[in-house]
């Protein structure tokens, strides 16, 4: 089991999926689960500033998330919302939703169930989020906390927005990244922080393959999830 944590824009989701594929492991994007609740709140008109309302919504919706790194589909009440949860409007409300302690308690319980099932079935899993090494699976044998400079993370966010068809706005991207950081690091429930025994990896000057190589080497050093032969060719 490998836990990847870090703030937005560090590339942890891309890294986690790539690493899981390379190592033949399952994959879980815990942040997507909070995004589903945020999307459901937007669609239902639920006040994201009301912890009680958001909690009731989280208990009511049917959420399903795939653990195949090649096709990590996300369903909301049976409908595929894999693309919808990445919309900018969801970005704006996901942190307040994720800050609700009761919602975190509910989703963490679900995350642990998914992780246990994948470990029993596949034998290994790469999990990414913001509290994996500190709360969800604090006993993970390898915990990595990804970091990157604010400028790098803002540039990556702006590039993502542009790829989604939005106009480039570096200042807005920087504000979005810093705003999420403030909420995620100061929330009372499971704040974003590195586990005491996490390995720090700065991705500012690394491309995707360099990040994957570094992570795979860490996994090999810990004796975890040996790479399939074809992955090393």
Image (spheres, rainbow, N blue to C red):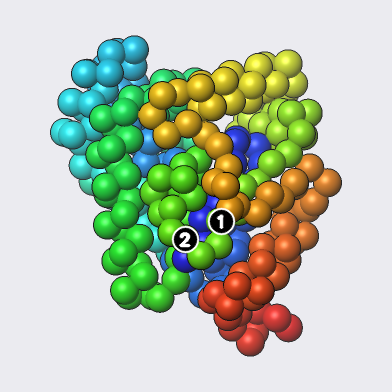
Q: Is residue 56 visible?
A: yes
Q: Is residue 87 above or below residue 228?
A: above
Residue drawn at the location 33% of the way across and 51% of the way down: 111
Residue drawn at the location 47% of the way across and 65% of the way down: 1
Which element is circle 1 on? Answer: strand
Horizontal side of residue 93 vs 59, given as left or right: right
Quadrant of image for the C terminus:
bottom right
Q: Is residue 7 above or below residue 121?
A: above
Please report contact status of discs 2 and 1: CB closer than 8 Å, yes or no: yes
Q: Position of residue 33 (x, y in %)?
A: 37, 41
Q: Position of residue 69 (x, y in %)?
A: 49, 62
Q: Which residue position holds label 1?
A: 143
Q: Is residue 221 above or below residue 49?
A: below
Q: Position of residue 173 (x, y in %)?
A: 67, 22
Horizontal side of residue 147 vs 226, given as left or right: right
Horizontal side of residue 4 vs 170, given as left or right: left
Residue drawn at the location 60% of the way across and 62% of the way down: 18
The answer to which quarter of the image holds residue 55 is: top left
Residue drawn at the location 59% of the way across and 25% of the way down: 181
Q: Position of residue 43 (x, y in %)?
A: 30, 23
Badge 2 crowding class, 10 Å Cα cut-off, few under 14, some 14 to 19, many 20 or more, is some
Q: Which residue position holds label 2?
A: 140
């Amino acid at each position: 089991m490998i836990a990847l944590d870090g703030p937005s824009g560090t590339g942890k989701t891309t890294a986690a999926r790539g690493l899981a594929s390379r190592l033949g492991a399952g994959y879980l994007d815990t942040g997507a689960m909070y995004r589903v609740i945020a999307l459901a709140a937007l669609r239902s008109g639920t006040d994201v500033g009301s912890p009680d309302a958001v909690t009731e919504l989280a208990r009511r919706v049917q959420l399903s998330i795939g653990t195949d790194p090649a096709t990590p589909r996300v369903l909301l009440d049976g409908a595929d919302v894999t693309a919808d949860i990445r919309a900018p409007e969801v970005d704006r409300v996901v942190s307040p939703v994720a800050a609700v302690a009761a919602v975190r308690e509910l989703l963490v319980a679900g995350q642990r169930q998914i992780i246990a099932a994948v470990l029993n079935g596949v034998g290994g899993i790469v999990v990414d989020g913001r509290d994996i090494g500190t709360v969800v699976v604090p006993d993970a044998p390898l915990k990595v906390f990804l970091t990157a400079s604010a400028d790098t993370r803002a540039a990556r966010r702006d590039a993502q927005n542009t790829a989604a068809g939005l106009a480039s706005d570096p200042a807005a991207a920087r504000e979005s990244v810093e705003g999420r950081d403030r909420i995620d690091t100061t929330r009372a429930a499971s704040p974003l922080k590195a586990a005491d025994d996490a390995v720090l990896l700065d991705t500012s000057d690394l491309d995707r393959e360099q990040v994957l190589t570094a992570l795979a080497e860490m996994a090999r050093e810990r004796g975890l999830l040996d790479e399939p032969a074809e992955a090393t060719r």
